[in-house]
Structure formats: C-alpha cells, structure tokens
Image: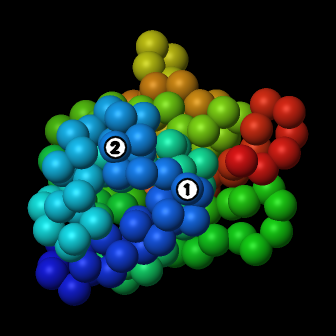
Amino acid sequence: MDTLSLGTLGEHLQSLRIAQGLSLSQLATQAGIAKSNLSRLEQGQGNPTLDTLWRLAVQLQVPFGTLVKPIAIPLGEDGVQVQLIDQGKGSPPVDAYWMRCAPHTSRHAEAHTPGARETITVISGEIQVGPEGALQYIKAGESTDFEADRPHQYMTGENWATLLVTIIYTSSRGTAP
C-alpha cells in the first residue's frame, strides 16, 4: 500500500476508534493484534494484512467497506486483491467489492459480523467458495451466497478469477451492526 493510502487509512481508523471511545490497548486486545502494530497503523506506517483489517472492522462494529472507504487502490496480499466499489446508503448496510484471485490461491477468510451474508458472482474464471468444509464450485456467470459470519474460503484452480462480492451486514436479530 502506498504511503498516502496508508496515512489516510491510519487517520480514518483512529477516528473510528476514538468515536467509539476505545483506547489503543482496548481495540488491539479485542482485535488480537499487538498494540504497537495498531499504533503504527494509525500513524500511517506498517503493512496491514487483509485479515488484520477485517478483525479491526469487526471489533469496531463497522462494515469492512466503512474502514477502507477512504482508500482508492486495491488492497492485496498472497494472490488476492480487493477493492471497495460502493456502499449502500440504506439499512441493512451493503458493501460491493471487486475481487481478483491468482491461480492456485487459497484464501481463508475470518468470520464477519454476526448475521453477515456474502454473495459471490464470478465475472471470469472459476472458484470454489463458501464456508470451510462446504465449498461450492462456480464459474463465470454463476453466483452463490452463504452465511459469512463463520470462517470461509476462496480457492482458485489453474486460472485467475475475477469476482463481484456483495456483503449484507445484518445481525441475527435482523438489524444492522
């Protein structure tokens, strides 16, 4: 991630944390990351993983897109690139992402907030996706959806896969987080 994007992310993360009345120590502990790493991230330094950003969004009780919204470049690691396309303005919150996965990529995603539901539409290529232990094979032009409030996985074969990922953030009680 470039310096400008990292600085923008750090400022935004800090403002979300402060708005919720959380200290650095509290958020770091809740997200399972070192306080020093969170401090560096808020200062616009470091190189956060997608999993770290997801855990921070979950602990801040905001959609992932709310956390990364100020960043205009794709976020990526280990053969996966993700970029927020848009966020719905209504209730429940809805995020839409462009996602690209390299050949022979296996990405394990942590659980999203309770009640979150993910829809995957394959634009090109093919992928196995879904909750761990219950993957579904889908190819270009096909879609699937699943409960994303438990660990899930994305696995590509021989070719690149380009996906449209939509996440609806509803709680198990039917309200937004």
From the top left corner, tell me how far across and down residue 172 is, in percent.
79, 31
**Looking at the image, which is closer to me, 102 or 107?**
107
Which of 108 and 46 lies nearest the eye of the viewer?
A: 46
x%, y% of residue 168? 69, 51
Using the image as rendered, state which of residue 162 and residue 107 is in the foreground: 107
Q: Is residue 23 visible?
A: yes
Q: Give the residue at x 22% y 71%.
A: 43
Q: Quadrant of residue 174?
A: top right
Q: Which mark is residue 137?
A: none
To which residue does mark 2 refer?
Answer: 25
Numbered label attached to residue 21 = 1
Horizontally, residue 114 falls left or right of residue 91, namely left
Quadrant of the drawing holding the N terminus: bottom left
Label 1 neighbour load within 10 Å: few <14, some 14-19, many 20+? few
| Residue sitting farthest toward the top | 133
- What is the spatial separation of the Cα atoms under label 2 and label 1, in whole angstroms? 12 Å
Which secondary structure, mark 2?
helix
Residue at the image position 71 percent from the left and 47 percent from the top? 177
Q: Report the side of 165 relative to 6 (left or right).
A: right
Residue in the picture at 60% in, 48% down: 61
> In the rendered view, would you say 57 is above or below 131?
below
* Image position, residue 118 (x, y; %): 61, 44
* Amino acid type, mark 1: Gly
Tell me if mark 2 has few (under 14), some (14-19) or many (20+) residues whose alpha carbon lies within 10 angstroms of its own. some
Q: Is residue 124 visible?
A: no
